[in-house]
Image: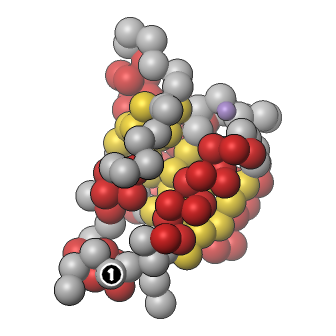
Amino acid sequence: MPPKVLIIEDNPANLELMTYLLKAFGHDTLSARDGEAGLEAARSGLPDLIVCDIQIPGIDGLEVARRLKRDPVLGKIPLVAVTAYAMVGDRDKVMAAGFDGYIAKPIEPARFVGQLEIFLSSAERAMAGEIK
Ligand code: MN
């Protein structure tokens, strides 16, 4: 099975773009529009990677990260913040909440999937067609 990426993002245009890019590179995607739905999708879908916006309705991305990283199973899934929340010091706050990485918006379509694949195992990258 190709790697499965959960995208937690409330902006429909960003969600559509990230979904399009990931599918174009051979990944399966799941999506959620708010924090609670994102946690539920992580539990039920057990993705290989989670991409999460910080400013989302309900519990924010920082709290989503804290809750995921407290869970012995979900805490092992690589978790990458994708957010415009890029003021001085916010990167530290994002990483302190438990994120494994950080990509600033606006995303660069030509680089986005490659930036995420750094967080997947080489076996998962191979299944997505990255490694021949
Ligand atoms: Mn947002």
Residue to which mark 1 is pinned: 129
Quarter of the rendered structure image containing ligand 1? top right
Specify the farthest residue to the top: 88
Q: Would you place residue 84 above or below residue 17 in this image?
A: above
Specify the farthest residue to the bottom: 1
Q: Would you place residue 27 above or below residue 20 in this image?
A: below
Q: What is the secondary structure assignment of the residue under circle 1?
A: loop
Q: Residue at x 46, y 83 (%)?
A: 2
Kind of residue at badge 1: Gly
Coordinates of residue 66 in the picture (x, y in percent): 53, 40
Q: Residue at x 79, y 34 (%)?
A: 58
30 or 25, nearer to the observer: 25
Any atom of ligand 1 within 8 Å of the CB at mark 1? Answer: no
3 or 76, nearer to the observer: 3
- In the figure, is residue 68 to the left or right of 129? right
Q: Residue at x 49, y 65 (%)?
A: 22
Coordinates of residue 106 in the picture (x, y in percent): 49, 32
Q: Residue at x 28, y 75 (%)?
A: 130
109 or 11, nearer to the observer: 109
- In the figure, is residue 30 to the left or right of 102? right
